[in-house]
Amino acid sequence: MMFGTSGIRGIYGKDITPELALRVANAFAESDVCIGQDTRESGVPLAFAAMGGVLGSGHGGIGLGIVPTPLVAFGTMKFACGGIMVTASHNPAEYNGLKFMRKGREISRAEERRILERYGRGMEYGAGPGERRIENVIPDYMELVKKNVDAKLIGKRKPKVVVDCNGAGAVVTPYLLGELGCRVVSLNCELRGFNRPSEPNKENLSWLSSAVRACGADFGIAHDGDADRCSIVDERGELLNADVQLALMIEEELARKKGKVISSVESSLIVKETVEKNGGEFVLTPVGSVHVSEEMERSGAVFGGEPAGEYVFRGGVGVPDGVMAAAKYVELFCSDGKLSTLASKFKTNPMAREKFRTLDRVNAMERIMGTLRLDGTVNKDDGIRVDGEGYWVLVRASGTESIIRLTAEAKTKELLEKVAGKAREAIRKAV
Ligand code: MG
């Protein structure tokens, strides 16, 4: 068993089994634990097994049913307990996994090591079984979101929004937006399995794009399986560029309160420039929402987000929250107007995103660190990122797959080809 960027993940029945869920949940249970799951069918045996592991430890188990990851985080705050979310997030349907939370955020790397240690020692049983109860956290969570947006403004404007949940978001996002006064059209809101691949990217959102155009909606919202992500489609059915989408939210959050904005080493020039233009301070962390969230807590930042559509809000829970993000974009539309117009003021730069297969990504990365030569500020917190004059380059190993990723952005195509070429050469020699 291994922890990845965000909990444990793998193919159900092979890497991730009910037996593993039972044992790891038992190792995690130091107090009561609330347990949620997304709509994957394999989530049913895994959530039952995790509940068994918790109750076996002698601690109480709180069943939350099908809920998004941010609502499990909310549960850990409301009940002052640990939290387990059964999900493989944006990964395909045959995958599943477990995310662990405490005090509203994902557990630290140090706690992951502690769990591994206890997992290695085998099952531990309490004096008697813990108590199991079922709780509905959705109404209280909705109240929290409503406090963070201008409900009056939304109620007056009554935007028409198509919501493509395809997962756990189906239990809350359409209802929340409806209560706020939106005219909601729901798509893929069944509570069993997925109707489209989980990742809310362009290829997977063609139904949403068509639905937005067909309904004459103001815009569309899509989640991944556990609804910690939110992708936005404008009124023409066009998916917003992920960096532009993040920049729009940063503007909005910095207009509310000035301060630090946390993003990962994958964030683009648009994001950096938007933070600086709006009087914020830009801070980089390794890739992964747990780092963004920890740095937010440490530095008292006003907002944190990654270009994958994962945003952590100051007034909300300590994990990315695609549901609150959905409500925030509704508010943004009501106050500032058409999303296509808002997005068009950002000029995207040429970018390169490439993957390279390797058998040993750790050793390959070490060789790349030694041979990559580019001018600029070097950050080695997660892979290697070089910020130079009008460009940045990132080379890092994937957290879950046997690949090395190259990401580069530059003000001109010529400069991009030059810097990406140098990185490509260093990677090819190393893999
Ligand atoms: Mg997710």
Image (cartoon, grey):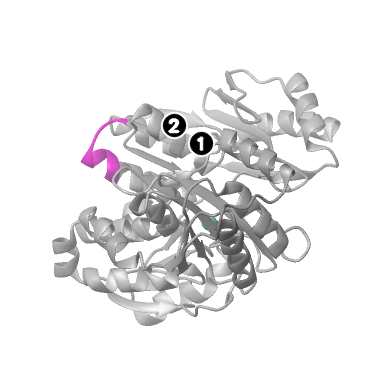
Specify whether residue 359 is painted magenta.
Answer: no
Q: What residue is rendered at 36% in x and 60% in y? A: 326
Specify whether residue 256 is painted magenta.
Answer: yes
Residue 29 is left or right of residue 105, and the answer is right
Q: Residue furthest front?
A: 127
Q: Are marks 1 and 2 in contact (CB under 8 Å)?
A: yes
The front one of 197 and 354 is 197
The front one of 314 and 336 is 314
Q: Secondary structure at mark 2?
A: helix
The front one of 112 and 67 is 112
The front one of 233 and 55 is 55
Tag 1: Cα neighbours inside 10 Å, few (<14), some, or many (≥20)? many
Tag 2: Cα neighbours inside 10 Å, few (<14), some, or many (≥20)? many
Mark identifier at residue 295: 2
Cα–Cα gap, marks 1 and 2: 6 Å
Q: Which residue is mark 1?
A: 291
Q: Secondary structure at mark 1?
A: helix
Quadrant of the snapshot with the C terminus: top right
Residue 412 is left or right of residue 247, and the answer is right
The residues colored magenta run 252-259
Where residue 128 appears, as percent x and y from the top left, is 55, 58
Q: What residue is rendered at 72% in x and 48% in y? A: 122
Q: What residue is rendered at 23% in x and 37% in y? A: 257
Residue 318 visible in the displayed image: yes
